[in-house]
Image (cartoon, rainbow, N blue to C red):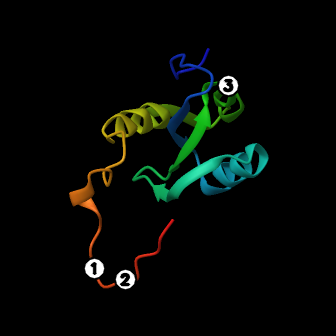
Amino acid sequence: MSAVPNEPHDDILRLRVTAKDLETLRALLRETRSDIGGRPHHEADGRVGIDVYATAAQVPALEREGVTVTRSGNASEAGRAAQAEVGSGDRFAPADAVPRGLAAKLSG
């Protein structure tokens, strides 16, 4: 059973993958061809961790002996929240909001 809770299958999860050593982590990443974020971090106990971006369906491929997978966030959900902050419409639509400056103003 996965330690990562179920999510919509399309969502990209941010996971922290920690392996017993660097060689185990390299082999896992080479085999799964996972999308990674950042560089590996060495823990005080000798383990090595890295952030991985994957769907919930890809999580079982990451889980194996000597490897711990924990969810640290939902990248898709964070993206949707950021998109919700963006306004809609044309901010230059009013006549008095036409951009001004030294650049050439092209028609059309």
Give, as a three-letter code, the residue at label 2: Ala
Q: Position of residue 106 (x, y in %)?
A: 46, 75
Cα distance between the residues tagged 1 and 2? 6 Å
Q: Which mark is residue 57?
A: 3
Q: Which mark is residue 103?
A: 2
Q: Is residue 2 above or below residue 95?
A: above
Q: Position of residue 59 (x, y in %)?
A: 64, 29
Residue at x-position 36% and y-position 47%: 90
User: Which is more foreground, mark 3 or mark 1?
Assistant: 1
- Quadrant of the image occupied by residue 80: top left
Element under disc 2 = loop
User: Which is more foreground, mark 3 or mark 2?
Assistant: 2
> Do we see residue 99 in this rendering?
yes
Element under disc 3 = helix
The residue indicated by pointer 1 is 101
Cα distance between the residues tagged 3 and 1? 51 Å
Q: Residues within 10 Å of mark 2 (few under 14, many from 20)?
A: few
Query: Closer to the camera, 26 or 93?
Result: 93
Query: Closer to the camera, 90 or 107?
Result: 107
